[in-house]
Amino acid sequence: MKRKWFFGLLALGSAMAFPVTAFAADEVTAPMLQIGLNSLFVFLAFILVFFMQAGFALLEAGSVRMKNAGHVAGKTILTLGIAVIAFWALGFGFGFGNGNGFFGYTGFFFGGNADTGSFDALTASGVPMVILFLFQFSFAAVSLAIACGGMAERAKLSVYIIFGILFMIIIYPIIAHWVWGGGWLAEMGMQDYAGSAVVHLTGATAALVATYLLKPRLGKYGKDGKPNSIPGHNQVLSVLGVVFLWVGWFGFNPGSGLSALGDGFFGYVALTTNLAAAAGGVAALLVSWAVFGKADIPSMLNGVLAALVAITGSCAFVEPWAAVVIGVIAGVLTFFTAQWFEKAGLDDPVYAFSVHGIAGMWGALSTGFFATPELAENAGVGKAGLFYGGGFEQLGVQALGMIGVFAFVLVLSFIILGIMKAVMGIRVTEEEETMGLDISEHGTYGYPEQMGLISGQSKKDLNS
């Protein structure tokens, strides 16, 4: 037994020593090692954020009816493919290319590390540009996933394609440039560490416009105008989706520092992120219990996500106790605004605007209250918040940025979707909606046996 332990330790030591020997042979310098470690860190963060698409697929599929589950899950892959191509061709250049205060105009059809000179706003970290492209793309794809959430159960498949392309080229990149690409909000010192406004408010505002123009689902409102409950078909899928998203957020927020070195600040960001999420979920559940008389699971899930959205912008600027407060407020706000929007006639099947829009607004404003002088200095962005002696200056910047993002996306989304509605229509027919988008758009159900299809029935039979 001792001999086995000896040889095992020897083998492990050899494996660990090999790269050190290789580095010594190539005379790898300390800066090269730092860049390598940071590059690996950002790439792992990209994988976590990319994996959030699985969370969206599960959450949305579980939140809709069985007859639309396959369609909702499948369009996640479609919009992801659209996001990759459109962001590579034009979106990355408009968002992060060298330009003016409103948009970039270099680096289109991104060619890899050879294009480094086209993206001055991203070069400070030293991480290779190709990895930064992947990381920034994953954020853009999350924003598009949020935008498409408000279209669930009644939008044509073609709408996802056309609007998805335009969103990834025109809408999201311009907002990203304003805050992260050296634009006018960056010059003013807007604090949005990982995108409460850039990612979440942008996607949610587009979802709001889509929800409004598409009108409510059939049967959502009675003749008296009161909303009817249309529960999702599988809460277990929704819970798993939220767990996946929660895990993915540890790439979203900590990864935004673009570094694994120093004092491990990414761990602090992960701490505030985790605290807020937990507080938001518990707060939303307790509020739903008090209002409904029952502890509502979807409300708890929305509370977790809303808190994650809110802390996304402030995670690097606030103390842990403030993260808990931000999460609680986000969870409560989302619960009540979701109820209010539904009663007002806005049929948002996945509560995209309440979870990502309202919470995104709160997240954008929160640093104006809670940002500490030390953390603001450490991040190198903006100043201290109102509660830490900073007065109303930073709060004013945050409010201006939040309003600017909301207004720009609202107007542009109305123009794009309004033209699409007039020219081609954006909603399926009543017959197709009644059948379900699985069968009307794809020729088969996501749950064929449960939907009563006969084994072996052909797509030709289904379409006849």
Image (cartoon, rainbow, N blue to C red):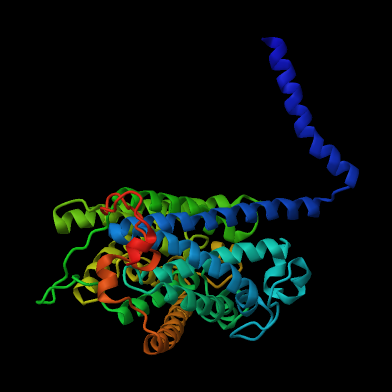
The outermost residue toward the left is 224
The x, y position of residue 106, in whole percent, is 70, 81
The reply, left or right, for residue 108 in relation to residue 137 is: right
Do we see residue 449 in this rendering? yes
Q: 411 or 187, which is in the foreground?
A: 411
Q: x and y percent of residue 394 in the render?
A: 48, 76
Residue at horizontal 42 percent and vertical 68 percent from the top = 146
**Location of residue 30 with respect to 194 vertically, above or below:** above
Instruction: Tell me if residue 316 comes above or below residue 110 in the rendering.
Output: above
95, 375: nearer the viewer: 95
Quadrant of the image containing the C terminus: bottom left
| Percent coordinates x, y for residue 3 in the rendering | 72, 11
Apparent side of residue 400 relative to residue 330 in the rendered image (left or right): right
- The front one of 376 and 118 is 118
* Rendered residue at 31%/79% (across/down): 214
Residue 18 figure quarter: top right
Q: How many marks?
A: 0
Where is residue 460 drawn, in percent x and y?
38, 63
